[in-house]
Amino acid sequence: MEDHGHHPLTADRTRPSRRIPAVWMRGGTSKGLFFRSDVLPSDPAERDALILRALGSPDPYGTQIDGLGGATSSTSKAVIVGPSSRPDCDLDYRFGHVSIQSPLIDYSGNCGNLTAAVGPFAIAEGLVAPVEGVTEVRIWQANIGKRILARVPVRDGLPLETGDYHLDGIPWSGAAIELSFLDPGGSNEAPLLPTGHEVDSLEIPEFGRIEATLINAGNPTVLVRAADLGLTGCELPAQIGADRALLERCERIRAHAAVTMGLGDTPDEVSRSRPATPKLAFVAPAADSLDTRGEPIAAERIDLLARILSMGRPHHAFTGTGAVALAVAAAMPGTLVNATTPWAGQSGVHHCRLGHPSGTLEVGAEVIADANGWQVPRAILRRTARRLMEGVVLVPE
């Protein structure tokens, strides 16, 4: 057959589409579409319309079948990365949680899992010069106004993806990327403890009163006891997701807590326009349980059980920023999370081992008290990341 020089990736199309350079990446237990900031429109509305269409949203069928999104909260995400204007950072990183069925991208919080892929993306794209062995990448998280230090393994000038670090929720091992969330407590929106209390009692219309720890570390997060929801903490995502009454109650708790935290004017407004944050998680004392594979998680391997909801659905593992918030609360005496741990009543440096639906996760947090109240110098999390596909995403004109 004669070759006329046309290739499927470069051939003319009868239906014109915009061709936007992008990379599909996994970070931790999430996947997202990564863009350099200089390839996207400068107008935010035009930029968001392009990202929505690339992911296949809004889709009233809930499948994102005409886009790259995976129709779950863990796979409907976008990341924008570019050089930083700050002298203390190398990159500016903005995260967008793309709604599946609504024309909405929520930029109110960060994705701790995809944060692990930001450094490798930047090194591969030439935004950060590689240092053989380990490259330290200083990241400015623009959503929440916080610095994150990523230590990325590098070999022959490229991010190393293979290794022996196993992250529960991912079938294959990889190279560990250490993320240090620097001074993660509080943000421009709200302080570390938005109400000033380690535990608040919330009155939820139609559901009654429930105690919660409202914390802003990594992301704004609402932490409640599993028992107060009529749960054990061992429940798996399929069981939680099938209970519509439970999900409705959790959303009402989340929305009312957001208003209490100063993150919205009314619960209905929060549910409508701010689905990504705050996250809601529930915890229980360590107990023997099973993960989604049917593998046992022995109580002695963990410090507590935890489950988290993301965009209104149960997460298949545990969100990275949710783990940061939980670890900070676990190291802070007076919170309902701290009371659930073996070190109840103690602050300081703790490595919290949480049991989640896909296995276990360890996250470290340093919490100290001074004249100004609780301070959180850093939280540390390890993840893996991998570049899955690179090229152009086609967006209909």
Image (tube, helix red, strand yellow):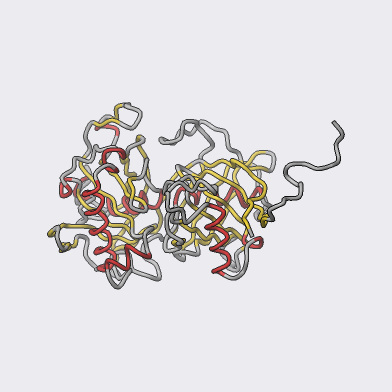
In the image, taking residue 125 as reference, residue 295 lies left or right, namely left
Instruction: Say whether residue 194 is visible.
Output: no
Residue ID at (43%, 56%): 99
Residue 123, percent from left and from top: 64, 50
Report the front residue among 293 and 240.
240
Q: Residue reaching furthest left?
A: 208
Residue 10, percent from left and from top: 76, 47
Residue 130, percent from left and from top: 66, 48
Report the front residue among 244 and 13.
13
- Where is the C terminus found, in terms of image quarters? bottom right
Residue ID at (59%, 58%): 81
264 to 225, vertically: above or below: below
In the image, taking residue 97 as reference, residue 353 lies left or right, namely left
- Where is the N terminus found, in terms of image quarters? top right
Residue ID at (31%, 57%): 221
Q: Residue reaching furthest front?
A: 14
Instruction: Say whether residue 24 is visible.
Output: yes
Residue ID at (15%, 49%): 228
State how many labels appear: 0
Residue 220, percent from left and from top: 34, 60
In the image, taking residue 53 as reference, residue 305 lies left or right, namely left
Report the front residue among 62 and 392.
62
